[in-house]
Each structure stands twice: as C-alpha cells, then as structure tokens.
Amino acid sequence: MNETPFSAIKIGFWQRLSRNRLLLLLLSLLLFLLIWQVLVIVLNLPGFILPSPAEVGKKFIDVFRTGLLWRHFSATLGEILLGLLFGISAATLLGYALSKSPLAERLLSPFLVGSQSIPMAAVAPLLVIWFGPGLLSKVLICSLTVFFPVLVNTLVGLRDVSPDLREVMRSLRATPAQTLRHLEIPAALPVFLGGLRVGASLSVIGAIVGELVASDRGLGFLINVGRGQYDTALVFVAVICLVVLAASLYGLVLLLENKVLSWQTWRKEV
Amino acid sequence: MTLSPSEIALQVSDLEVSFVDSDGSLEVLDKISFSIARNAFVCIVGPSGGGKSTLLRAVAGLIQPKGGKVLFPGGSEGKALTGLVFQKPNLLPWRTLRDNISLPLEIDHRPDAEISSLTQEMIHLVGLEGFEKAYPHDLSGGMAQRVAIARCLVQDPEILLLDEPFGQLDALTRERMGDELLRIWNERRKTVLMVTHSISEAIFLADRVLVLTCRPARLIMDLPITLPRPRTDAMRYLPEFIEAARLLHEQLKGSNLPVC
Ligand SMILES: Nc1ncnc2c1ncn2[C@@H]1O[C@H](COP(=O)(O)OP(=O)(O)O)[C@@H](O)[C@H]1O
Ligand SMILES: [Mg+2]
C-alpha cells in the first residue's frame, strides 16, 4: 500500500499538463517555432523567402529598440480605436432608433443584409480616393467594418426582447428610458456583444487594408516597406503584431462578455 | 346589494375588447360589467381561450378597450392602483431573486434603504429567505411564481390582478399557495381579482365567483360564496361548497366546452 505505482505518477503528470491551458499553449508555440526553424535550415531557404524565427526575433528587437515598431503599432492602434468608437456608437444609436420604427427597419433591411457581403478590401481604395491617405480614411474603413455587424446584431437583439417581459415593464409603468436600462440593454447584450466580437477583429483587417492601399504610417505601411526592401523578416514582425492586436481585441470582448453575462451560468460550464 | 362609490374598488362597465389583425377582427370581450367592493376577493372562471387574461390586461390598462370603461372610484392618488401577476412568472433572467422583487421600487425611484427593507419584507412574506441571490433559472416553478407575486405585492397596489397564478403547480403546492395567498390578503387587506380554471380553488378562495362564456366572453353568472372566514380544508366537504361547485360546473358546461 505504501509504494506509489510509477504509472500513477505519470498519468498524474499528463493530466495536470492537459489541464494547464497556458502551459499547453506555450508548448505548442514552442513546437511550432522549432519546426519552422528546422524547416528553414533543412530546406536552406534564403531569408527573403522565409526568414527563420531567430531572424524574425532579432528583427523584432531591432525595430523595437529604435522605436520604429511602436510608432507604427500605435498609429494602427489609434486608427482602430477611433474607428471602433465611431462605428460602435453610430451602429448602436441607429440600431436602437430602427428597432423603434418597424417601417424604417423594413425599408433599410435589404441594404443592411446586402452591406454584410461588401468586401471591405474593395471599398477601401474608394475611401482613400475620397478622404485622402491620412488618418480619416483609415478610421472610416474601421468604422464601416465594425458598423454593420454591430448594427445588425443590435437590431436583432432588441427585436428579440420577449414581448412578455415588455408587458411586465409596461405593467410596472416604466418609462422608455427605464425599459431601455432594465430590460432592453441586458436582454440584447449577448447578441450585441457577439456582433462586437466579430466587428472588433474585422476592424483590424479594415485598418490594414486601408494602410496597404496608401499610407505613410502604421503596420500596413511597415508591411509595404518590408516587401519593397525584400525585408521579409520585417513583414513577419508586422504580421505577428497584427495577430496579437486582433487576438487581444477579441479576448477583450470575450472578457467583457464573461463579466456582464455572468448570470448565464451555462457559459461557465461550457 | 348596492355599494356607495367609496366602497367600490373597481368598476367595469360595458367593457368591449377586440383584436384586429390582417384577417379581420376578433371580438374577445362583449359588454362585460361588474363592480368589486373594496377588500373583496373575486375569482373569475371560464373556458380556456375565452378572454379571461384579456379582461385582466384591460383592467390593468395594458390593452385599450374598444368600448366601455374601467374605473377605480375610491382610488387614492399617487399609489399603484393595480398590480398584475401574469400567467407565467416572467422574471428577468439576469436579475437575482432579490433584484427581481425590487424592480418595481427601482422603477419608482424609491430610496435605497426603503428598497432593501421592503424587498426583504416581501421575501419573508413569500417564504423565500435564503434564495435571495438565486437566479430565476435555478428556481422551481412554484418558487418563481412566488417571486412574481412578491414583485407585484412590493408595489403595494390597491388591486391585485392574478392570472392563473398557480396554473403550473401540482395540486398540493397549489393548495398551499392558496392558503398563503389568503393569509397575505388577510394581512394586507387588498382587493383581489383572480383568474383560475379550478372551480374548487375559486370557491375556496373567493367571496364571489364570476363565470365568463366562450369568446366573445360575456358574464353569465355572479355567484356569492358565503362560507365563513378563515377558510379551512374541512369546508371543502360542506353542502354549501358542493352546491356552489355544482352550480358553477353546470354554468361552465352550459356555456360550452372547457376549451373555446
Ligand atoms: N394580443 C392579442 N392579439 C390577438 N389575439 C389575441 C391577443 N391576446 C389574446 N388573443 C386572443 O383572444 C382570445 C382570448 O385570449 P385570452 O384572454 O388569453 O383567453 P384566456 O385567458 O381566457 O384563456 C384567444 O382566442 C386569443 O387567441
Ligand atoms: Mg389566460
């Protein structure tokens, strides 16, 4: 009884490992980098085709030290945050107004559905032509990308508020503002945040597309520079920053969802 | 029996309601008239789909009637006149039990201290202490319905409108809730207008039972129940009780089927 079987310890280790998600993530990342490095060495690829992780890492430290990376990263971040601010505000306000006017909603809904299928990459050059290569066109592109999913989800969320609960609010003599606060916002929030989650990650793509078309700063600009100088490691650095940016935005919305929707205990169980 | 206006809590006269939609209009209430004395307990029975819920919603002011009037002759100013408990609990799923009960007070902009003391009092009244932080999806049907009743009572309305409040409960819980309702009614002295599909429940609880017909609903019977109070289970076997049940049953059968 007092001797621990070896296999038990082993199973315990693997079980503990599989439960530690952060550790697993790091491990898979490490494995990925390893395969990448080995591939570059074995295939003997030149740096401008596929730089090794080590080269990319060195590049990262270089551009970080000179402040170049932060300048362009913050430019893109600024465009995205401004775009999100305007896009989300406009979409939420218009969504609420439309939900109160079924006629206007019916008139506009074909356009709203259609707008969902407009590829932003195709519209971006137009916006740059109309509004110049500066900040404004990028903010507009971001706003538009986040605008439609948030608008549609705001509308759907508000439309699906239970009529029975609306009647409860009426029987309690609630004002429209009180109905908004106590019923409509909490009821529509899950669907709204779903739209925001999609919109926020799309807005990163929106900003980059705008920068790729024409710009003098931002991660998209950095990608253009790297491409022009066959500095593929620089392109990689910019792309990785973009991925981190998009993932952080996504994670932020997810965090918000978990916080405000904590009453939905099934969310935690999943 | 004629009442002076100050003794009347609710007066419904020639109330007509119809719903209009794309394929015509549906007449639901046909010239319904009755009045209820202050602090009386009145039950309404009638076939399903006949218009009982519609009548309560019209009295609560949720539906604009096509004709007729709903009056509250002795109503005091500035107080919640009617409180409606729906057929379903209709709780807000993102609010805890306590916050569901305090909702009407928040809407009424009461001070925080008052909100918390009144809410606590209601939780005690409906016997749900210990569940204050539970969410609606964790409550049983009976508990949820009690929360709905507490949410209505916390406004201290003069007239309680109850729409089959025990509809989804099993027979025993139902009887217990009926007893509790009588206790609350006795403690708080309210006028109650309650819809039920159970004849014996109506007789056990009420001073008067109104019988509605099938759609368009008309009032075909107004039966006083003279059993003494407090009501006890033993009264269910008195000849008076059984005679009332027989009369109501006959009227309901004559008015058509139990379903419209
Ligand atoms: N908002 C509404 N719009 C159209 N028809 C309705 C509406 N509410 C109720 N009705 C109809 O009115 C009739 C009476 O309904 P209701 O008052 O709920 O009956 P009961 O409560 O007696 O079962 C039913 O035929 C129902 O379909
Ligand atoms: Mg009903």
Image (cartoon, coloured by chain):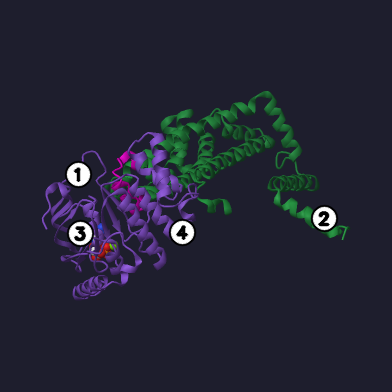
Chain colours: A green, B purple
Residue type highlighted by circle 3: Phe
Residue that numbered label 2 is attached to: A9
Is the residue under label 1 in contact with that under label 2 (CB below 8 Å)? Answer: no
Does the segment drawn in magenta span residue A153?
no
What is the chief secondary structure element of the magenta stretch? helix
Side of A59 relative to B75 (left or right):
right
Which mark lies nearer to you, 4 or 3?
A: 4
Task: List x then y, in percent, for residue A56.
Answer: 72, 36
Instruction: Give the structural element (helix, strand or loop) at label 2.
Output: helix
Instruction: Give the structural element (helix, strand or loop) at label 3.
Output: strand
Residue that numbered label 4 is attached to: B140
State the extent of the magenta-drawn residues as a range.
Answer: A159-179
Residue that numbered label 1 is attached to: B75
Task: List x then y, in percent, for residue B48.
Answer: 27, 68
User: Which chain letter goes with mark 2?
Assistant: A
Which disc number belongs to residue B19? Answer: 3
Is the residue under label 3 in contact with that under label 4 (CB below 8 Å)? Answer: no
Q: CA distance from mark 1 to mark 3?
A: 29 Å
Task: List x then y, in percent, for residue B247.
Answer: 21, 73
Label 4 neighbourhood size at 10 Å, few (<14), some (14-19), many (20+)?
Answer: few
Same chain shared by disc 2 and disc 1: no
Which mark lies nearer to you, 1 or 3?
A: 1
In the depicted structure, whether residue A79 falls above or below residue A148: above
Is the residue under label 1 in contact with that under label 4 (CB below 8 Å)? Answer: no
Name the residue rendered at 76%, 44% in the picture: A45
Q: CA distance from mark 4 to mark 1?
A: 36 Å
Instruction: Give the structural element (helix, strand or loop) at label 4.
Output: loop
How many numbered circles are shown?
Answer: 4
User: Which chain letter goes with mark 3?
Assistant: B
Tell whether circle 3 marks a residue whose Cβ is less than 8 angstroms from ligand 1.
yes
